[in-house]
Image (cartoon, rainbow, N blue to C red):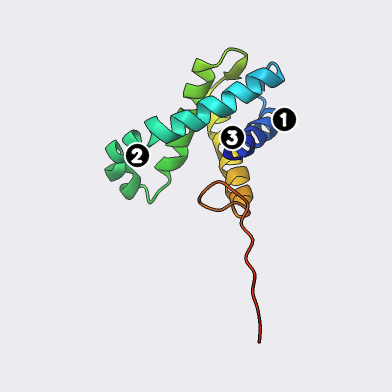
């Protein structure tokens, strides 16, 4: 489910940001898978290494870190290109916003969660 959300964010970034392009639906799917894997394995290590810089910039460096992860996904996936620093930054912001909004409906296990409130 999270891969679908990342793919939706990449598709929206492809539509809105001129420097990001996915040549096909397959490239979009592979870019979402690659970005998910990069965010799962590479990003935590880089987050730990750049923690002092993140603290000094009050968290704004995370945008740069996310842009780097998006650029790395573009480097790995054929047919998915991220051209330029600002394209990566704006694309990372769009993907983060889409992921954050969509994750409000998905629980920590990656499934839909329904909360039932019973009033007496």
Residue 7 visible in image: yes
Tell me if residue 25 comes above or below residue 51 in the rendering.
above
Residue most toward the bottom? 120
Quickly name the residue at label 2. Answer: 47
For the residue pair 116 and 68, the one nearer the viewer reads as: 116
**Residue 30 sits in which quadrant?**
top right
Q: Is residue 11 left or right of residue 55?
A: right
Q: What secondary structure is found at the residue carrying circle 3?
A: helix
Could you tell me which residue is drawn at 59 percent across and 38 percent down?
95
Residue 113: mark in rendering: none
Q: What secondary structure is found at the residue carrying circle 2?
A: helix
Q: Earlier in the sequence, mark 3 or mark 2?
A: 3
Residue 45 lies, in percent from the top left, at 32, 34
For the residue pair 79 and 18, the one nearer the viewer reads as: 79
Tell me if residue 73 comes above or below residue 61 in the rendering.
above
Could you tell me which residue is drawn at 34 percent across and 39 percent down?
47
Q: Nearer the viewer, mark 2 or mark 1?
A: 2
For the image, the number of numbered tags is: 3
Q: CA distance from mark 3 to mark 2?
A: 21 Å
Q: CA distance from mark 3 to mark 1?
A: 18 Å
Local packing at callout 2 (Cα closer than 10 Å; few below 14, some 14-19, many 20+) is some
Residue most toward the top? 78
Quickly name the residue at label 3. Answer: 3
Residue 112 lies, in percent from the top left, at 63, 52
Residue 15: mark in rendering: 1
Could you tell me which residue is drawn at 51 percent across and 23 percent down?
73
The quadrant of the rendering that contains the N terminus is top right
For the residue pair 76 and 51, the one nearer the viewer reads as: 76
């Amino acid at each position: 489910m999270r891969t679908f959300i990342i793919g939706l964010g990449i598709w929206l970034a492809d539509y809105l940001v001129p420097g990001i392009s996915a040549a096909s639906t397959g490239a979009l799917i592979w870019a979402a898978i690659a970005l998910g894997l990069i965010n799962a394995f590479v990003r935590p290590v880089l987050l730990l290494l750049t923690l002092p810089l993140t603290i000094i910039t009050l968290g704004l460096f995370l945008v740069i870190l996310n842009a780097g992860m998006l650029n790395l996904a573009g480097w790995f996936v054929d047919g998915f290109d991220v051209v330029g620093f600002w394209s990566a930054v704006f694309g990372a912001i769009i993907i983060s916003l889409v992921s954050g909004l969509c994750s409000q409906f998905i629980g920590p296990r990656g499934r839909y969660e329904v909360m039932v409130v019973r009033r007496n």
